[in-house]
Amino acid sequence: MRLGPSKRRVPGASARWLLGRLGGLLLVVWGAATAGFLALTLIPGDPVDVMLGVQAQVSEQVKAQIRADWGLDDPPLARYLHYLGRLATGDLGESYQLRQGVSSVIGEQLPATLQLTLLALAFALSLAAIATLAARGRRSTRIVSLVELTAVSSPTFWTGLVLIAVFVFQLGWFPIAETGSLRALVLPALTLALPVAGIISQVLRQGLDAASARPFATTAIARGVGDGRLLFRHTLRHAAADSVTLVGYLVGTLIGGAVLVETVFARPGLGRVTLRAIIDRDLPVVLGIILLAAVTFALINLTVDVLYRLIDPRLRTGSVAT
Amino acid sequence: MTVTLGRTRLRPPRAGLAGAITASAFLLVLGVAAVAPTLFTHADPIQTQVLQALRAPSLEHPFGTDQTGRDVFARVVYGARYSLAIGVLATTIAMTAGLLVGTLAGLAPRLIDSAISRVIEVLMSFPEFLLALLVIAILGPGPVSLVIAISLAAVPVYARVARVQTFTVRRSGYVRAALVLGVPRWRSVLRHVVPNTLGPLLVMATIGFGTAIASAAGLSFLGLGPQPPTPEWGLILSEGRNFLGTAWWIAVFPGLVVTVTVISASVLGRFLRARGEGTAA
Amino acid sequence: MSFVSVRNLRVRFGQRTVIDGVSFDIAPGECLAIVGESGSGKTITARTLLGLAPDGADISTDELIVAGVDASAYTDANWRSVRGRLVGLVSQDALVSLDPMRRIASEVAEPIEVHEGGFSRSEVGTRVLRMLADVSIPSPETRARQYPHELSGGLRQRALIASALAAAPVLLVADEPTTALDATVQSKVLKLLGSLKESGLALLLVSHDLALVAQIADRIAVMQHGRIVETAAAADLLANPTHPYTRALLDAVPTSHAVRRDGGEIVLAARSLVKQYPAPGRSTTLALDDVSLELRAGTTLGIVGESGSGKSTLGRLLLAIEPPDSGEVLLRGGPWSSLAESTRRRKRGGIQLIEQDPASSFDPRFTVRRILDEAVAITDARATRPARILELLEQVGLSAVHLARRGHELSGGQRQRVAIARALARRPSILVCDEPVSALDVQVQAQVLALLENLQARTGLSLVVISHDLAVIAQLSDTVLVMRDGVVVESGEASEVLANPKHPFTRELLDSLPAGRILP
């Protein structure tokens, strides 16, 4: 097989790849926006009535204004383009039920959810690390596996309730209703963290096991490498590469779980807003959150791909073996 | 003299046969409870008896009673049919749709495959639970919406696995052998591609069944599923939320049943996967 | 104290005894080769010299002296001071034996860092470069910074050897060190090991290939079913083998046959085939560049080349699995590659295929009965199929007892026989064999090759045999095609090409064969 002029590295391959991925990101955002638009069109009944909610008593004039805002009387294509145009300028519309701009609604609630999610992530990583280190021998591995399985299988809302029942009511360690302090954040974050910790721990341990069974690990051991060096210089990198692909899924679990946790613990945050919006059919808010979620996940996936390429040199260049 | 050399390397603990049997047994019991609840309890899950309200667990009421005096154990037993029905329906729909879409993508010309893959990617960039939430946002709450929402949210995962598996089988030596023998393409697809893709999907579906039940319970908990007084597990949990301090059993036991169901589905699924990997060359 | 001495090594897994009383010695600077087929226990035996044992193994010895050290009571911590410092290990296939996520320099430096602390980074760096130069890797400074996947197979294996020797051990255990490499590269790496031995390194060479190890081994030990059946000086063993198993191994080495056939009409012809594939970075690779060939009835055409030569692509084009970009394949003088698949399908019975890896040639869910039924059902009515299936099994030396087994329950040789039976179902006149015996042990290889020759003699089957192994080609072929980089560099009658090669590459291929392998 004759190859083209033998290059060590294909120039610009990384830049082209990044550009491609950014394009993908835009595609995802566009897809989500379109999906939201379709959702709006699919809703049975008059969208305006739906958006205003059951309770609203509003004059025909205001309703006409809303129709104009959303271009509901225009032909579908014009409506679609108008909608995309608005989004491109960052205007997410207004929630008629909450009487607030969607962006400001989201902006108000985001910090609380972020706090919760970040603390949960910290807990999850720590717990996973402890679990990985604790699984030394055959017996401890079995116990750790069982704990992981339970953590992953328990529904978030249930663990939350159980934790409340035990730590708030029975033991009285945590306050019942207080929401502002760090103390009040602990139980919710822990609840959110458990399934995530379980998954990280499982994948990490399996990754380490798989890596230490591969031939390169035998070679390293044959050089006199001990357990510590084998772990930190060899297998960890391989296991991390496997785990990195999980990050997107995990963030998804964290955010999805936030909805449940905020409801269980009666905490303010995006989760509760989302739930309210869904039950009350507050479409502008729902659409705004869909878009926010889409952008977030697409960004995370992009970061994951970049991380992956950084960790595994085999993916890095378009180089050819010479 | 005896010398022990070398290192004991840890093998990932696989779900053994004992675990798989226990898991299957539990799921079977659940199935029976769904179909014939009177085998397990004589109490009425819907009829209120205010005089019996908030009794702690006892021989007469193994899971205690709730705020209107209903036997929680009975409610859990009768609730099994809702959770199982939703779980089985949603998983079957998702798996079938995923199989069709994924196989199509794997066999289709590059352009169509690219288009389908993009859509799958976009859908997969959302967490399943959120996707389900959004579908319910469009359709409105209720048990039917629940099934549709959960199936839709799960399809991308099945589709992706089906697609990858279809590619693998397409390139395999035995499909090539069939081509060389002169077997028409459509026949080798039906004979080789579909069955070999179905295998991994069925294993995923076993675990997915557990996830579906947990999602259903979660969405019901949020009030988006069946309405009271239906004894759906998630609903019971949300009712019990107000009584955590005084009657913890209302919330704890139904959730425990959900957890054990999900664990059983996972254990069984892992066992099947390990066995499947053993026989696939 | 002796240098290396193992007495009465016994390895058990539960009730199963895998190694049953093995004893051997190695003198300093000597090369001992352990030869055996897969499953003979040679790898486990070799690795006990490094204190490496598979999970759950129960090991006992009367004596275990490694590089002058009594290791019989060693714990894992003790072994760590031996591994890499006194004994080095080189395994098969550097692509997976080196850490793909670490640079060559880090891998080679590791033994130094583990056993000889106190060197500065630049000192270690210099030593690494010296090691790479010692194993004849050109441009060591560039190579040291690269990752394993960026090096070719031969260079990778040398780097692996360098990493085993970096802390200057006195004994090197080489377990199938050249098996994953092309023939020409194999001989170079083997010569490297030979020269290392000349400079004082003791070598334990483990392989399935008796002829290969004969090139550098001083003494050879033959292993079968966990026991050493014969040990002798290399020359003595090859000239006067005493144990029947050793004799069988030597007999199984392919040798060329004197009688050559002329053949009848041309049954398969290729004209100026060109085939391109897309390559990374928007370029294309030219897999085949103007390749032509002819196959005459009742003869065997051997296509030989290394990996990347295009021979497998050629096979696929001959079978019309893929279309050529230009050029044409003719079957019995009529169009073949240019036909529409619907028309061609009916004629496919005339030319069939067996491949290297029968494991993926069979649907993992299918039993042998179903595998053969799929083939037989194309032409035979339901009533006659069972009889036909039995007939096919008999033709390849199998029987009804194999019908209920699945692919992975058969041995390598049995799988290949089933593949041949399946190919024969449609009564082809041409059989294309793509690396038919590469994945098999030497003895089983010989049996399958004999089967193919037998079939050809009985039925007048025409064969196209594609292989990287020149010895296999030499045994079977009447005419030969030598390929390199998508081009036919030499072709003609086998006896002529192998005796008087004209192209330098053909000569290189012939040279890389161990002496005594083929004698046309």
Image (cartoon, coloured by chain):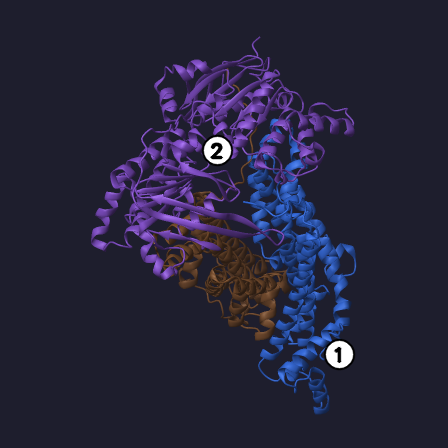
Chain colours: A blue, B brown, C purple
In this rendering, is residue B147 above or below C119? below
Image x and y of residue A257, in percent: 64, 60
Q: Position of residue C64 (x, y in %)?
A: 54, 15
Pointer 1 and pointer 2 on the same chain: no
Q: Could you say where residue C382 lies in the image, as x and y percent from the top left? A: 23, 55
Q: Amino acid at mark 2?
A: Lys
**Which one is in front, B192 or A268?**
B192
Badge 2: chain ID: C
| Quadrant into which the N terminus of chain C falls | top right
Q: Mark 1 — residue?
A: A99
Residue B276 - label: none
Please give the residue where the numbered disc 2 appears in the rendered image. C502
The chain letter under disc 1 is A
Q: Name the residue at 39% across, 54% down.
A: B192
Which residue is pictured at 24% across the width and 51% down the height?
C385
Taking the image as shown, residue A37 lies to the left or right of residue C182, namely right
Quarter where residue C194 is shown: top right
The residue positioned farthest toward the bottom in the image shown: A60
Q: Closer to the camera, B48 or A207?
A: A207
- Amino acid type of the residue tagged 1 in the rendering: Arg
Q: Residue at the spot x=42%, y=15% of the render?
A: C237
Horizontal placement of A156 versus B190: left or right?
right
Determine crowd level at label 1: few under 14, some 14-19, many 20+ residues with C-alpha closer than 10 A: few
**Does the image show residue A246?**
yes
Q: Are marks 1 and 2 in contact (CB under 8 Å)?
A: no
Q: Is residue C392 above or below residue A215?
A: below
Q: Nearer the viewer, residue C199 or B214?
A: C199
